[in-house]
């Protein structure tokens, strides 16, 4: 009977709530038990030692507290939505990255096979012409190497595929977790907005529960999924034929940036001890001092090595010779294909161009970088010589003119720099090549 009467009174007067036990108007709020009290409830032994305050006072405190929490929840909701959008974007990006790495791996093994065949032909062509048995052995060697290389290629591609699936699963789990968190934040936001409305008693209804649940949401960390860099799926090994193709590249002083000092033998370069007032852009190459190689390539295969150990930010690659297109003096402003290295702490980050994109991250010092150019196939590979592994390659490129090696050092803003690059000389006897299926993997 008393419960029905209390309900009827509340419907008639939304802000006048009556105690269901004593049928008295509730005007007090017990902070300890988080319930409304009438006068008789207040004087009962049950609430004798509890903290009790007036309804209006309690509602004002909780309304202010809920409004602060509501603002923070809305901020966190926007952050969660932003992270979710980033995760969904990363899902698309890693699919593209995986396809890029797949094409890079396949093109590298194709080039490696051609180099191996060329190496075998280089050593045994004359003997095979007059000796059918040697010709048959040579063919068997090529077939054996092709089988071995195909197995290595499939193994590398499988590792890439497994890593791609693992990364995608992590991102999907993160997407689901963030979506659920966003849903909870939205529900909590709606609930607190209602509590902060005009009705005083609505603020206090289940106030403790609302406070606990909202604080729990705010304490949950919002993090992106930690995925593995696909560049860890390295193509290891380098063809020994590269040593046969290695060129004695020299620097062209006519194309050197004024900030560069070239050695007398034109095989090394370093920055002048000057300060440059250029905008800062952490991790990016805002300004570079460039010089081209004297050598110009229009056909064939070529390879050169550069010592980068004393440089923290550098660029290597090839540039279209502007003189071959315009008939004027050569400059370093032609179309370029570049690998850019940046040492930050103990990590090496590699960027490729074009287009500009981060392609690899390695936690080790770089010593020598090898550059391989195949003019006919439009292929350029960059190698970590010390670890005999591929850093990155470009394939099926189209050039309009002669290509020249390009070398750049990046100038920091407002500080001096002692970075330097040195071009390595070819081995004394580059024709001493051992022929075996494993020779390209040494």
Image (cartoon, rainbow, N blue to C red):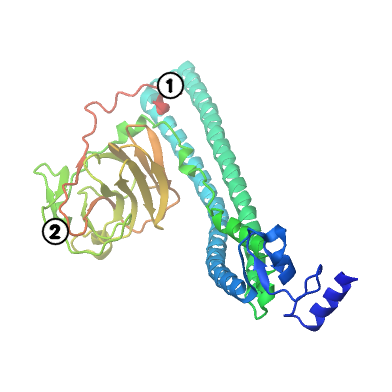
Residue at point 11%, 53% (across, down): 272
**Whole-percent x, y for residue 182 in the image:** 62, 61
Q: Quadrant of the N terminus?
A: bottom right
User: SS for tag 1?
Assistant: loop
Q: Which callout, 1 or 2, points at the residue further toward the start of the chain?
A: 2
Q: Is residue 156 visible from the viewing direction of this image?
A: yes
Left or right of residue 60: residue 235: left
**Whole-percent x, y for residue 6 in the image:** 83, 74
Crowding around mark 2 (Cα neighbors within 10 Å: few <14, some 14 to 19, many 20+) is some
Residue at point 65%, 54% (across, down): 176
Q: Which disc is residue 275 wearing?
A: 2
Q: Which disc is residue 244 wearing?
A: none
Q: Nearer the viewer, residue 54 or 127?
A: 54
Q: Quadrant of the C terminus?
A: top left
Q: Quadrant of residue 38?
A: bottom right
Name the residue furthest left: 264
Q: Is residue 38 visible from the viewing direction of this image?
A: no
Q: Quadrant of residue 202?
A: bottom right
**Whole-percent x, y for residue 110 in the image:** 48, 38
Above or below, comparing residue 6 to residue 86 in the picture: below
Q: Which disc is residue 436 wearing?
A: 1
The residues tagged by marks 1 and 2 sit, at their Cα atoms, a distance apart of: 52 Å
Left or right of residue 138: residue 427: left
Residue at point 32%, 32% (across, down): 386
User: SS for tag 2?
Assistant: loop
Q: Nearer the viewer, residue 55 or 365?
A: 55
């Amino acid at each position: 009977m008393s419960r029905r009467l209390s309900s009827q009174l509340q419907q008639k007067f939304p802000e006048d709530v009556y105690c269901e036990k004593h049928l008295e108007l509730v005007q007090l709020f017990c902070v300890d038990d988080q319930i409304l009290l009438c006068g008789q409830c207040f004087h009962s032994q049950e609430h004798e030692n509890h903290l009790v305050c007036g309804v209006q006072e309690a509602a004002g405190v909780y309304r202010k507290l809920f409004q602060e929490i509501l603002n923070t929840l809305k901020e966190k909701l926007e952050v969660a939505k932003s992270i979710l959008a980033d995760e969904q974007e990363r899902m698309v990006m890693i699919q593209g990255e995986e396809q890029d790495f797949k094409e890079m791996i396949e093109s590298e093994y194709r080039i490696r096979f051609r180099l191996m065949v060329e190496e075998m032909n280089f050593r045994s062509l004359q003997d095979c012409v007059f000796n059918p048995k040697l010709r048959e052995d040579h063919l068997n060697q090529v077939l054996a190497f092709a089988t071995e290389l195909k197995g290595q290629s499939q193994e590398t591609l499988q590792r890439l595929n497994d890593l791609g699936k693992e990364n995608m699963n992590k991102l999907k789990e993160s997407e689901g977790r963030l979506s659920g968190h966003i849903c909870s934040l939205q529900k909590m936001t709606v609930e607190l907005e209602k509590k902060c409305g005009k009705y005083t008693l609505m603020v206090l209804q289940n106030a403790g529960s609302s406070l606990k649940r909202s604080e729990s949401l705010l304490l949950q960390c919002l993090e992106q999924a930690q995925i593995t860099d696909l560049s860890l799926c390295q193509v290891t090994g380098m063809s020994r034929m590269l040593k046969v193709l290695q060129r004695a590249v020299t620097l062209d002083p006519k194309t050197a940036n004024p900030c560069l000092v070239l050695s007398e033998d034109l095989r090394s370069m370093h920055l002048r001890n000057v300060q440059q007032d250029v905008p800062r852009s952490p991790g990016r190459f805002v300004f570079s001092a460039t010089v081209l190689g004297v050598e110009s390539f229009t056909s064939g295969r070529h390879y050169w090595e550069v010592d980068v150990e004393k440089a923290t930010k550098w660029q290597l690659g090839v540039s279209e010779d502007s003189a071959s297109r315009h008939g004027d003096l050569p400059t370093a402003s032609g179309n370029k294909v570049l690998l850019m290295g940046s040492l930050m702490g103990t990590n090496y980050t590699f960027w490729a161009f074009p287009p500009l994109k981060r392609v690899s991250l390695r936690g080790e010092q770089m010593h020598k970088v090898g550059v391989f150019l195949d003019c006919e196939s439009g292929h350029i590979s960059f190698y970590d010589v010390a670890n005999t592994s591929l850093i990155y390659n470009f394939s099926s490129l189209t050039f309009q003119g002669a290509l020249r090696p390009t070398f750049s050092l990046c100038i920091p803003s407002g500080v001096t720099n002692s970075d330097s690059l040195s071009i390595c000389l070819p081995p004394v006897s580059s024709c001493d090549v051992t022929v075996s299926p494993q020779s390209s993997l040494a």
